[in-house]
Amino acid sequence: MAKYPTFLEQFRSFYFQNNPKDIEVAIEYFSIFGGMGWSVDTSKPLLELIESKVLKNYTYIHGDITKVTNSDKVSHSLLSGVAMGDARTHSAIKRARITRDESQRVITSLCEMGFMKLESSLEGPPSSDKIDEKLNFSVPFMRFWFSFISPFFKGIKEGDYKEVKESFTNRKEGFSNLTFENLSKELIKKSFKDDRIIEIGSYWDRNVEIDILAKTKSGKIIAGACKYSNAKVKKSELTKLKSKCEEADIQPDIFVLLSKSGFSNELKNEKGADLKLYALKNFKTLVEDLSEKDFIECIGKRY
């Protein structure tokens, strides 16, 4: 299996190489260009960078990606299905319009190469129903590629970028959510030093999704929600999280809420041993003490 750097290693390298002005900018630009080792001027608008670095180099990047996928149309369909959906295998297969047998071959191959990873719900669902695994990209840029570039390849090859730009503009606001969630898990791992995290992931069943579910060495259960929006998180989000846990028959010892835009005063007053709140400023701890050793050299073309 190919060994890709971890998500956090890729983020630290991106941050060291490009020195973004703040964590919010880092998250948004890393969601698109992360894992490629490119120098990115984070002071420039995203659409401008997407055009100059990706769209105008489509032929070269596509050629390198097909070396991994062997130009397999089924692989490309599945990858786009994963990137544009909720990442559950059943949903991705349905979007890709391929058979379960075809998908199994492709999923096995992509995971063996390290191109993707399968993730299971951290706890079994309350019922005995089989719950689909989720497929996650190992490199952030590949998720961006199969979300916005691969589906519009015909126009791009002809130099027409209209569809790509419209699609990105319409979906840009929510595209960084997954990056924020992945970094949130890294922050939780780093924050619980006295009672370290021994297992962390997400929970989902047919009715409920919980962004973060973790277990500490002492056996405590942590449940969390991530909100990457321009509004402050209110107490209603904590109520919603508690309701989800109750429905999933999970009894957390600690609740955690992570927010891009901070928290209401009412929610801040609830903060204590059983409720921890993390704002963007807390994510700065993930990029402390950066040095040359954190930089991951780009292998191959820089385009």
Image (cartoon, rainbow, N blue to C red):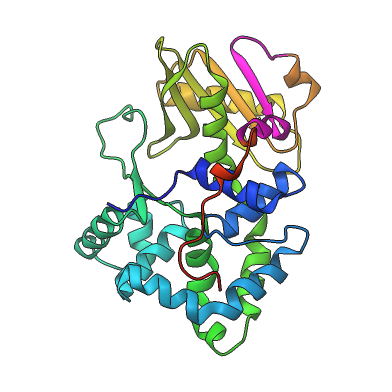
Residue 97 visible, this angle: no
> Residue 261's quadrant in the figure?
top right
Count numbered badges in the picture: 0
Quadrant in which the C terminus appears = bottom right
Does the magenta portion include 276?
Answer: yes
Which residue corresponds to the image point at 68% horizontal and 29% vertical from the top-left?
282
Residue 176 pos. (x, y %): 61, 50
Residue 146 pos. (x, y %): 47, 66
Up-down relation of residue 110 to residue 55 (above or below): above
Whether residue 176 sits left or right of residue 127 in the image: it is right
Which residues are the magenta region?
270-286
Q: Which residue lies furthest to the right in this view?
A: 265
| Residue in the foreground of this view, choosing between 269 and 32 | 32
| Residue in the foreground of this view, choosing between 42 and 153 | 42
| Residue in the foreground of this view, choosing between 215 and 63 | 63
Does the magenta portion include 3?
Answer: no
> Residue 155's quadrant in the figure?
bottom right
Residue 219 pos. (x, y %): 39, 12
Residue 140 pos. (x, y %): 51, 55
Q: Which residue lies furthest to the front in this view?
A: 292
